[in-house]
Image: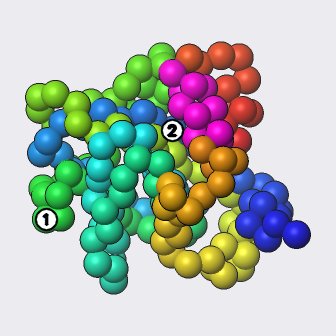
Amino acid sequence: MDVLAEVIRVAQVRGTVAARVDAADPWGLQLDRVPGAAFHTVTSGTAWLTAAGRSPVQLGPGDVVLLASGAEHGLASAPGARLTPFDHHAAELALETGSVMHVGEGDCRTQILCASYRHDPAVATPLLSLLPAVMLVRAASSDRGIDTAVRLLAGELAAPALAMATVLD
């Protein structure tokens, strides 16, 4: 039995915001708490994840991080980099047009897929509270299913089509 898949199904997870981010050094994003879950995957380059109570963690291509409780966190080019608030409005516009959000100045060094999801709080709160606040799946330890899902998500974000919200869910 796939416990995580069952938690997601029962919690009635639905997509809210997803974006492709191109980041140029130095850069940093502050992601406020979301009323659901959030995830990020680095598709090229590197990023540092910071979250309360945890040491900074470097993410590389193919790494996926899930914040099941939607906890406040940061992504940056280096530990201690200045963080600017994530622009959810720009993310929504990029999602509608299939464009990319740009952060930092200069040439792109890192590309990230970001998404946040909402869910039924009455069901999800007890279930998702059983998961760690930050779940990291390293590219080297994941199976091809995660890689395939990331590629499909990237393709959907790059070329929005009918029923995109349903596909993202």
Residue holding disc 2: 18
Q: Amino acid at mark 2?
A: Ala
Crowdedness near tag 1: few (<14), some (14–19) or many (≥20) residues, C-alpha within 10 Å: few
Residue holding disc 1: 80
Q: Quadrant of residue 151?
A: top right
Question: At which x and y percent is residue 34?
Answer: 48, 58
Nearer the camera: disc 1 or disc 2: 1
Q: Determine the residue positioned at 33% across, 83% down.
A: 53
Q: Is residue 165 above or below residue 70?
A: above
Q: Main secondary structure of the magenta part?
A: helix
Q: Quadrant location of the C terminus?
A: top right
Please check the rendered image and state whether residue 156 is part of the magenta-colored stretch, yes or no. yes
Question: At which x and y percent is residue 31?
Answer: 35, 55
Q: Amino acid at mark 1?
A: Gly
Query: Count the marks: how many?
Result: 2
Question: At which x and y percent is residue 165?
Answer: 67, 32
Please check the rendered image and state whether residue 149 is part of the magenta-colored stretch, yes or no. yes
The residue lying toward the viewer, choosing from 24 and 36, is: 24
- Residue 89 seen in the figure: no
Q: Which residues are magenta?
A: 148-158
Crowdedness near tag 2: few (<14), some (14–19) or many (≥20) residues, C-alpha within 10 Å: many
Q: Determine the residue positioned at 54% across, 31% down.
A: 154
Question: At which x and y percent is residue 74?
Answer: 30, 60
